Image (cartoon, grey):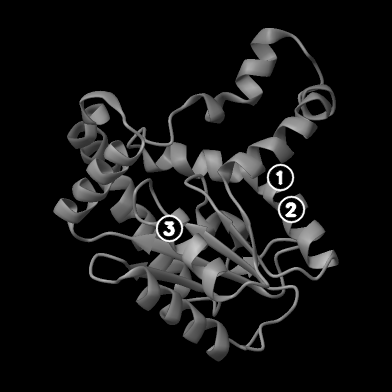
Amino acid sequence: MPNFPKDLVLILSGVPCVGKTTIAYEFLKQFTEFRRVGELDVLRTMARAVADDAIYASGYIGEKKLREYFRPLYYSVSSGDFTVMKQQSEFMVKYIREIVKRQQARKIPTIIEGSCIVPSTYFIEGVPIKDFERNILFVNLYLSDEKEHLNRRLSRCQERDYPNDFHAEEKIEKIRDENIQLHLDTLSLKERVHNVFSIDTSKLTPDVLVYTIKNIIDSNPF
């Protein structure tokens, strides 16, 4: 059994259909001490705090101001605009922080995964922001192969019984630029920090990718 830090938090980022959820579940299968926090769990945490944010952060509950405050969340995670993706990530940081604090206090190794996570928004000039300073590993999943990206989208459509493949080609085409920019943005950050990685999943099976991440954890000086 690997000797993972008990308060380790693995944060998986990546655009839709790169394999975040698949890898998270495969990781849990091999290392049962971990727990998974998916996007729905993050949204639940966020929903509990929305009223307070509306009152204290925006200072006013009027619809116009409220919509402006939460504006980044109105955009689809598949908007194809990396700037919007970063805005969404910046907005979600405070809610993911609460999950990180809770899980680390309980000393439960945890995987957090979501499409609205951009690792660079958790650092300021290469320095991690408060509550992300220790035992945090960011792993961005990237797909260099566009055909493989489309195939994964089509597979998801079949699994979930979406009608007419749910515009698979159109959706993948829109997020390919985000996929590339997120990868490059993460690589740039990796040059300055030790706990950020971006991995091309195009030719990696889930078990190989889990082994790759395990090796990163084992060799990382948390």
Instruction: Identify the residue shown where x is 78% and y is 32%.
Output: 48
Q: Image check: 175 left or right of 129?
A: left
Q: Which residue is mark 1?
A: 95
Secondary structure beneath disc 2? helix
Q: Which residue is mark 2?
A: 99
Single out the mark in the foreground, 2 or 3. Answer: 3
Q: Is residue 142 above or below residue 210?
A: above
Residue 108 image position (x, y, % from top left):
75, 68
Mark earlier in primary sequence (1, 3): 3
Q: Image check: 16 left or right of 71?
A: left
Q: Amino acid at mark 2?
A: Ile
* Cα–Cα gap, marks 2 and 3: 21 Å
Q: Which residue is mark 3?
A: 22
* Cα–Cα gap, marks 2 and 1: 7 Å
Name the quadrant of the N terminus.
Answer: bottom right
Camera-nearest residue between 179 and 168: 168
Few, some or many C-alpha atoms within 10 Å of disc 2 (few <14, some 14-19, many ≥20)?
some
Instruction: Identify the residue shown where x is 20% and y is 32%.
Output: 170
Single out the mark in the foreground, 1 or 3. Answer: 3
Q: Is residue 199 above or below residue 221?
A: above
Q: Amino acid at mark 1?
A: Tyr
Instruction: Identify the residue shown where x is 56% and y is 88%.
Output: 218
